[in-house]
Amino acid sequence: MSKNIVVLVSGGGTNLQALIDAEKNGELGNGKITCVISSKADAFALTRAADNGIKTRVLVRKDFSDIAAYSKAMRDALVEEKADLVVYAGFMTILDENVCDVFENKMINVHPALIPSFCGKGFYGLHVHESALEKGVKVSGATVHFVTAECDAGPIILQKAVAVEEGDTPETLQKRIMEQAEWKILPKAVQLFCDDKIKVVNGKTLISE
């Protein structure tokens, strides 16, 4: 029984592209990307989706009075699309419990650091890599985790470490983490979910291969 994957985006959609490529290569298990929902009308991710014959929807954050109203609209859209799994792929809006409770342990996000380092409110995009370099860490990486109403706090599914190199800038580190970690562990986590290989017990994930 194939599972419907709905991908949430806000920008260029490089992580979405990694998922589309993985699906084409048969690497998403029983999962199929059935819809892409963007928080911005001009996100290039929408073009990527359309080019691959995937349905798109736009829910612009500023069209709604507050996060609660936006979260309710998103919840309704996800229910309408019969989402079995919701994937944040560069989706820049934190949704509240209106969505997170309905889709508990069914929403995943990839974060460009090894949680619990460099995560939480304000840690997004290049800010994450700037902070990591300022701290002088020798290793960074990416984490795929379930989404809860608290930012970056849900159960961790997969992590992959990436070496920090001499002379790295936030931009070079960001690119290396995307290529070596994010684009690999996000599709893998989706595949594990869609093949029913992930269980959450006491706030931690158990993965059966």
Image (spheres, helix red, strand yellow):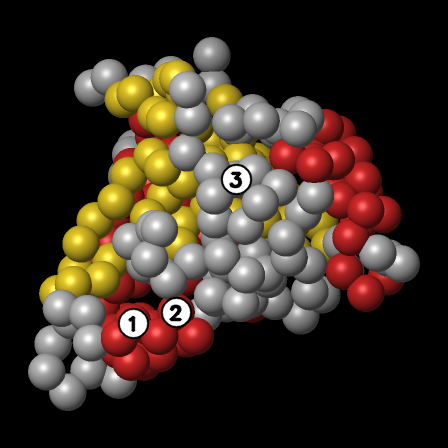
x then y, percent, for residue 37: 65, 49
Q: Quadrant of the C terminus?
A: top left
x then y, percent, for residue 6: 57, 38
Q: Element type at marker 3?
A: loop
How far is mark 2 from mark 1, CA to CA?
Answer: 6 Å
Labelled disc at residue 147: 3
Above or below: residue 71 compared with residue 208: below
Left/right of residue 148 with respect to residue 167 in the rendered view: right
Q: Element type at marker 1?
A: helix
Residue at (66, 28) in percent of width and height = 101
Three-letter amino acid code at disc 3? Val
Three-letter amino acid code at disc 2? Val
Check disc 1 and report the residue beneath it.
Answer: 132
Question: Which of 139/71 is in front?
Answer: 139
Callout 3: 10 Å neighbours few (<14), some, many (20+)?
many
Above or below: residue 196 compared with residue 44: above
Residue at (64, 57) in percent of width and height = 93
Earlier along the polypeptide chain: callout 3 or callout 2?
A: 2
Assess whether mark 1 and mark 2 are in contact (beta carbons under 8 angstroms). yes
How far is mark 1 from mark 3, CA to CA?
Answer: 22 Å
Assess whether mark 2 and mark 3 are in contact (beta carbons under 8 angstroms). no
Check disc 2 and report the residue beneath it.
Answer: 128
Earlier along the polypeptide chain: callout 1 or callout 3?
A: 1
Question: Which of 19/89 is in front?
Answer: 89
Above or below: residue 200 compared with residue 174: above
Labelled disc at residue 73: none
